[in-house]
């Protein structure tokens, strides 16, 4: 499910980068890079677009967090998460319809891309908050750097913890965290915690739920 | 998405794919919740 959401975020990012003036509305790390580059290139419009995307993403994350925090604790996928994603879907549909009406029109007195950027950033912020509420450690849907870093850290941990295991077990253990990250499977308790180690968690929780 | 938004020049149509994906995730989550199964 998280992989599908990451795919959706990639699509929104590609569409906004190509159609809204080279701005990223899901990958805020890349957006901050663009924000840093724009002043150096004397690109005030680029800076403004990046700032609008950042502000909208934060607003979306706040709104999404407000929605998902109302759900019951201890549930992997609470109905509040689905409600947040439904709100994201509404924003995306409004964005697509508005964009469809506006694109190809002659020049407007104001740059219509800014509200579209804001809508896309808002949707991706909501999705990020919902994905965080699901609580798969180190797995996100709107940026990859942190996910890759978490996967690499898990890989090292799995290698160390399975160093005494049989070679076949070790091969299986090395592949498991990567599949786990890709499938977005939950891991309880927290990996590499004392409870997780003593319970043999890396053996019993390597299958997606 | 790059083909539709970049080559064809119709970026709003490219949003149909993420809209479909999010709608599918919502549908799966709702069905899984009705069956009391964790959809992750």
Image (cartoon, coloured by chain):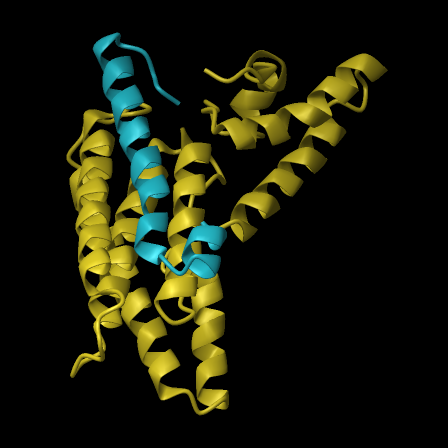
Chain colours: A yellow, B cyan
Between residues A71 and A5, which one lies in front from this camera angle? A5
Q: What percent of the width, then of the height, locates residue A56?
A: 25, 62
User: Which quadrant of the figure has residue A1?
Assistant: top left
Q: Residue at x 39, y 38 (%)?
A: A5
- In the rendered structure, the answer to whether residue A95 lies left or right of residue A50 reads left
User: Which quadrant of the figure has residue A152?
Assistant: top right
Q: Is residue A110 visible?
A: yes
In the figure, A149 relative to A36: above or below?
A: above
Q: How many marks?
A: 0
Q: What percent of the width, then of the height, locates residue B17?
A: 36, 40
Q: What percent of the width, then of the height, locates residue A93?
A: 20, 46
Q: Residue at x 55, y 52 (%)?
A: A145
Q: Residue at x 45, y 24 (%)?
A: A186
- In the rendered structure, the answer to whether residue B31 lies left or right of residue A12 reads left
- In the rendered structure, the answer to whether residue A135 lies left or right of residue A108 reads right
**Quadrant location of the C terminus of chain B in the rendered image:** top left
Q: Residue at x 59, y 45 (%)?
A: A148
Q: Residue furthest right?
A: A167
In the figure, A2 relative to A98: above or below?
A: above
Q: Residue furthest top?
A: B35
In the figure, A85 relative to B15: above or below?
A: above
In the figure, A24 relative to A144: above or below?
A: below
Q: Is residue A24 visible?
A: no
Between residues A91 and A185, which one lies in front from this camera angle? A91
């Amino acid at each position: 499910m998280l992989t599908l959401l990451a795919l959706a975020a990639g699509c929104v990012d590609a569409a906004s980068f190509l159609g809204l003036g080279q701005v990223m509305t899901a990958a805020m790390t890349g957006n901050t890079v663009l924000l840093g580059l724009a002043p150096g290139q004397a690109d005030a419009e680029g800076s403004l677009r990046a700032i609008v995307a950042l502000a909208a993403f934060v607003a979306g994350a706040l709104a999404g967090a407000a929605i998902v925090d109302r759900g019951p604790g201890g549930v992997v996928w609470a109905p509040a998460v689905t409600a947040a994603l439904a709100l994201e879907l509404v924003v995306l549909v409004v964005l697509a319809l508005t964009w469809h009406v506006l694109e190809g029109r002659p020049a407007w007195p104001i740059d219509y891309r800014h509200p579209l950027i804001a809508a896309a950033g808002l949707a991706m912020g909501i999705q990020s908050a919902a994905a965080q509420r699901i609580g798969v450690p180190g797995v996100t849907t709107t940026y990859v750097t942190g996910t890759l870093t978490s996967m690499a850290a898990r890989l090292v941990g799995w290698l160390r913890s399975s160093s005494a295991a049989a070679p076949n077990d070790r091969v299986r253990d090395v592949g498991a965290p990567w599949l786990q990250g890709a499938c977005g499977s939950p891991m309880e308790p927290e990996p590499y915690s004392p409870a997780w180690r003593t319970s043999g968690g890396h053996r019993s929780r390597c299958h997606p739920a | 998405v790059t083909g539709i938004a970049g080559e064809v020049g119709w970026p709003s149509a490219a949003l149909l794919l993420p809209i479909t994906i999010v709608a599918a995730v919502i549908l799966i989550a709702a069905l899984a919740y009705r069956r009391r199964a964790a959809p992750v």
